[in-house]
C-alpha cells in the first residue's frame, strides 16, 4: 500500500493482518488430497494472488477494539476473506458481470474454466463456514450466513443485476450497495467484535460503523471505476458504465458522490467514538476507505 495519505501505523497494521491471515489461508489450502489438486490450485490462485485484505483487517481491528487479542481473530478473518473471494469469483463469471481481470490478473474462469471457477468459489464458501464453526460457534455462523444471504450480498447482487440499464435514483442505489457490499463489511466488524468479547452496546456501535464505511467503500469503488485505470485497479476500469450499472456517480455525479463518501466516513467515526483509543485503527481505516486509490 503506497498511498502517502495512509499513516505508517495503519500501513504496518494492515501488513501484519495480511501476512498473518495469508498464513492461515495457506495452511488451510495446502493439506488436500491429490484428486482435488485442480480445485485447490484454483482456490489458491483466487485467494492468494492479491487483494487488499480490508475485510480480514476489519475483523482483527474490531476484535482489538473490543479488547481482544489480534491473534484470536485470525481464523475468522481468513474465513471472511474466503467468503469475499468466493463472491468475487462468482461476480466475475460470464453470467454475472463477465470480467476478464481481477486483482491484476486473469479471473478464475479465464485462467481455468467456468466450472472450475464456480466450484472454487463454492469450496471457499464451504471452507469458510467450517472455519467459522470451529472458531466462532453457531451464533457467528448464523450471523455471517444472514449477512451474506438473500438479505445481504446475494440479494444485493440480484438487485444489482436487475438494475442494469434502468434509470434509477440515489435511494435505490444505496439500497443495492448496502446489501451487495456493506453487508459483508458489517459482518466482518461484528464477528471481530464478538470474538473480542464485545458488549451488546459496543456491537451496535460496530454495526453502525460497518454499515457506513461499507456504503462509503462502494461509493468510492463506483468513483474509481469511472476515474481510475485498469492498471491501477487491477480490474477492468469503466465496466460499470459499459454495463449500465446503477452507481452513485451515475445518479448524483462524481463530486456529490465524493461528498457522500466523506459524510459516511465521518458518521462511521462518530459511531465508534464510544469505543475509545482501542478503536484508533478502525478510525484510521475509515479514512483510508475514502482515500484509497485502488
Ligand atoms: C453465488 C452465483 C453467486 C454469486 C454471488 C455475492 C456475489 C455474487 C457478488 C458480491 C457482490 C460484489 C462483488 C460486490 C462488490 C464489492 C466490491 C467492491 C468488491 C471489491 O472489493 P475489494 O476492492 O477487493 O476489497 P480486493 O481484491 O482488494 O479484495
Image: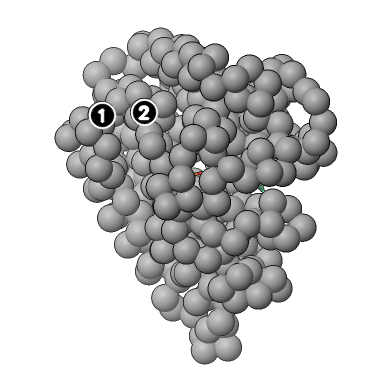
Q: Residue 182 got which mark?
A: none
Residue 217's x, y, as percent? 50, 30
Examine the rendered structure and indicate whether residue 147 appears above or below residue 76. Answer: above
Q: Are marks 2 and 1 in contact (CB under 8 Å)?
A: yes
Q: Is residue 240 above or below residue 79?
A: above
Q: Which residue is mark 1?
A: 5
Residue farthest toward the bottom in the current orientation of the protein: 34
Name above or below for residue 141 compared with residue 25. Answer: above
Between 50 and 61, the residue placed more toward the observer is: 50
Residue 102 percent across, percent down from the top left:
52, 57
Mark nearer the N terminus (2 vs 1): 1
Find the distance from the CA under tag 2 to the CA under tag 1: 7 Å
The image quarter in which residue 57 lies: top left
Which residue is painted at 55% across and 27% down in the image? 219
As drawn, the residue found furthest toward the left would be 8
Q: Quick one: quadrant of the C terminus?
A: top left
Q: Please give left or right for residue 278 compared with residue 94 in the image.
A: left
| Residue linked to disc 2 | 291
Q: Is residue 106 in view?
A: yes
For label 2, the crowd category at 10 Å Cα-Cα, with few meaning under 14, some 14 to 19 and many 20 or more, is some
Amino acid at each position: 500500500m503506497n498511498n502517502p495519505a495512509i499513516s505508517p501505523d495503519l500501513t504496518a497494521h494492515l501488513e501484519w493482518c495480511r501476512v498473518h491471515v495469508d498464513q492461515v489461508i495457506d495452511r488451510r489450502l495446502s493439506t488436500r488430497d491429490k484428486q482435488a489438486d485442480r480445485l485447490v490450485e484454483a482456490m489458491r490462485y483466487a485467494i492468494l494472488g492479491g487483494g487488499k485484505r480490508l475485510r480480514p483487517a476489519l475483523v482483527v481491528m474490531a476484535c482489538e477494539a473490543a479488547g481482544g487479542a489480534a491473534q484470536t481473530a485470525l481464523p475468522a478473518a481468513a474465513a471472511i476473506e474466503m467468503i469475499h473471494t468466493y463472491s468475487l469469483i462468482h461476480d466475475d463469471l460470464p453470467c454475472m458481470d463477465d470480467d476478464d481481470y481481477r486483482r491484476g490478473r486473469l479471473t478464475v474462469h479465464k485462467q481455468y474454466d467456468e466450472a472450475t471457477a464456480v466450484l472454487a468459489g463454492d469450496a471457499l464458501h464451504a471452507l469458510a463456514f467450517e472455519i467459522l464453526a470451529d472458531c466462532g460457534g453457531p451464533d457467528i455462523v448464523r450471523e455471517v450466513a444472514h449477512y451474506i444471504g438473500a438479505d445481504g450480498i446475494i440479494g444485493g447482487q440480484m438487485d444489482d443485476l436487475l438494475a442494469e440499464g434502468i434509470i434509477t435514483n440515489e435511494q435505490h442505489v444505496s439500497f443495492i450497495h448496502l446489501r451487495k457490499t456493506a453487508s459483508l463489511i458489517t459482518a466482518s466488524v461484528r464477528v471481530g467484535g464478538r470474538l473480542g468479547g464485545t458488549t451488546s452496546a459496543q456491537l451496535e456501535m460496530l454495526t453502525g460503523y460497518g454499515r457506513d464505511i461499507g456504503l462509503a467503500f462502494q461509493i468510492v469503488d463506483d468513483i474509481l471505476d469511472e476515474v481510475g485505470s485498469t492498471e491501477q485497479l487491477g480490474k477492468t476500469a469503466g465496466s460499470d458504465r459499459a454495463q449500465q450499472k446503477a452507481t452513485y456517480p451515475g445518479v448524483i455525479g462524481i463530486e456529490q458522490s465524493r461528498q457522500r463518501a466523506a459524510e459516511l466516513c465521518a458518521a462511521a467515526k462518530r459511531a465508534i467514538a464510544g469505543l475509545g483509543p482501542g478503536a484508533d485503527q478502525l478510525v484510521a481505516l475509515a479514512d483510508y476507505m475514502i482515500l484509497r486509490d485502488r
